[in-house]
Amino acid sequence: MAATVKDAEGAEAQVTLDDQQKINKFARHNAKLQDIKDELKTKQKELENLQDAEEELLMLDGEDEGIPYQIGELFVNTTTEEASELIEKAKGTVQEDISQLETHAESHKTVLSDLKVQLYAKFGNNINLEAEED
């Protein structure tokens, strides 16, 4: 049995199983997109931290005393050159992760856009698919 929704003019629109599945799909993709956005913020902050560490290493120019570098939960002493290489490698990995996350975000945005068009066409102002501002 399909539920009915009244619009502003009093006309009724049937909420079919297909419509409900589209709404559920929209909700799933929207939740995934929000998770990706949160992860992107984390990765961008990590990239900023790596860039800051790289700048700090440049200021140590020529000093080869043991530079502590964190690997997991362990700190190891490295030379300035080794630390610089490790930071460059980490930056490359983080940049790849950011690129992949942005690609995933775009695919979710495309699906959400298509679903918005379909759902707004059927339900008009009776459905709100816009994200709430924090």
Image (cartoon, grey):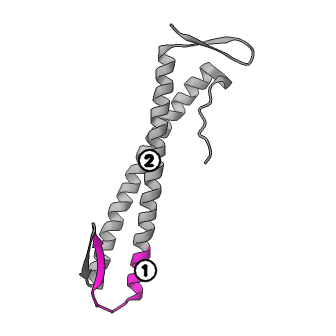
Q: Relative to the observer, which residue lies in front, 68 or 62?
A: 68
When the figure is inspected, residue 42 is found, relative to residue 69, above or below; the finding is above
Residue at image position (49%, 24%) is 22
Residue name at image x 53 percent, y 10 percent: 2
Which stretch did the figure color magenta? 52-71
Q: Name the residue under label 1.
A: 55
Mark 1, secondary structure of its residue? helix
Q: In which quarter of the image is residue 68?
A: bottom left
- Percent x, y for residue 40? 45, 54
Q: Name the residue under label 2.
A: 36
Image quadrant assignment for residue 74: bottom left
- Compared with 91, 39 (above or below) is above
- The residue sitting at the front extreme is 73
Q: Residue 41 carries which label?
A: none
Q: What residue type is labelled 2?
A: Ile
Q: Does the residue at mark 2 contact the one at mark 1 (Cβ under 8 Å)?
A: no
Residue 103: % across, % down: 42, 47
Badge 2 crowding class, 10 Å Cα cut-off, few under 14, some 14 to 19, many 20 or more, is some
Q: Which residue lies furthest to the top in this view?
A: 1
Where residue 39 appears, as percent x and y from the top left, is: 43, 52
The kind of residue on which mark 1 rests is Glu
Residue 51 occupies quadrant:
bottom left
Q: Does the magenta stretch include residue 57?
A: yes
Q: In the current view of this chain or complex, which residue is farthest to the right?
A: 9
Q: Note whether 35 is above or below 56 in the view shown.
A: above
Magenta span has 61? Answer: yes
Report the side of 35 relative to 9 (left or right). left
Assess disc 1: are there few (<14), some (14-19) or many (≥20) residues with their C-alpha within 10 Å of its C-alpha.
few
Q: Foreground: 133 or 110? A: 133
Image spot of residue 95 (x, y percent): 38, 60
Indicate the secondary structure of the residue bearing disc 2.
helix
In the picture as drawn, the residue positioned furthest to the bottom comes out as 62
